[in-house]
């Protein structure tokens, strides 16, 4: 399992995507988010949890002026920790199959 806290200042979020091997879970600590899982859009606020099963397209976006904070969980962890470390270091998000 990989769990991390994500702080969002600007509105928006990642494009619609899915994971082959990981389930994803969002727990809203602060602010408001629109979280789309499959065809369902959840308006999530502090204290809300949304589950995104593997192979189901999903995306999320911070909305409103208040800084947003999420706890994000990936199960199993797979290469997600490595992905987010590289992304935060500015290396880009693409990981090859060899890594």
Image: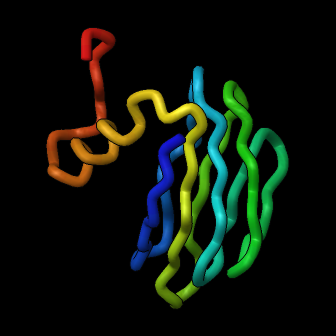
25 vs 98, left or right, is: right
Please report the residue visible at 79 percent of the width from the left and 62 percent of the height from the top: 42
Q: Disc count in the image?
A: 0
Q: Residue 28 placed where, x, y %?
A: 64, 72
Residue 68's place in the image compared with 89, above or below, is: below
Toward which corner of the image does residue 4 lie, by quadrant? Answer: bottom left
Please report the residue visible at 63 percent of the width from the left and 43 percent of the height from the top: 24
93 vs 30, left or right, is: left
Residue 84's place in the image compared with 55, above or below, is: below
Q: Nearer the viewer, residue 88 or 42?
A: 88
Please report the residue visible at 60 percent of the width from the left and 57 percent of the height from the top: 60
98 vs 64, left or right, is: left
Q: Residue 87 placed where, x, y %?
A: 26, 46
Q: Residue 1 placed where, x, y %?
A: 54, 40
Instruction: Pick the quarter of the image with the C terminus.
Output: top left
Please report the residue visible at 40 percent of the width from the left and 79 percent of the height from the top: 9
């Amino acid at each position: 399992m990989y769990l991390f806290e994500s702080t969002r200042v600007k509105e928006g979020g990642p494009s619609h995507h899915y994971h082959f091997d990981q389930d994803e879970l969002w727990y809203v600590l602060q602010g408001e988010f629109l979280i789309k899982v499959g065809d369902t859009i959840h308006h999530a606020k502090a204290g809300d949890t949304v589950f995104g099963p593997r192979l189901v397209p999903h995306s999320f976006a911070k909305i409103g002026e208040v800084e947003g904070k999420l706890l994000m969980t990936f199960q199993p962890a797979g290469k997600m920790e490595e992905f987010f470390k590289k992304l935060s270091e500015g290396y880009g998000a693409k990981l090859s199959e060899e890594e």
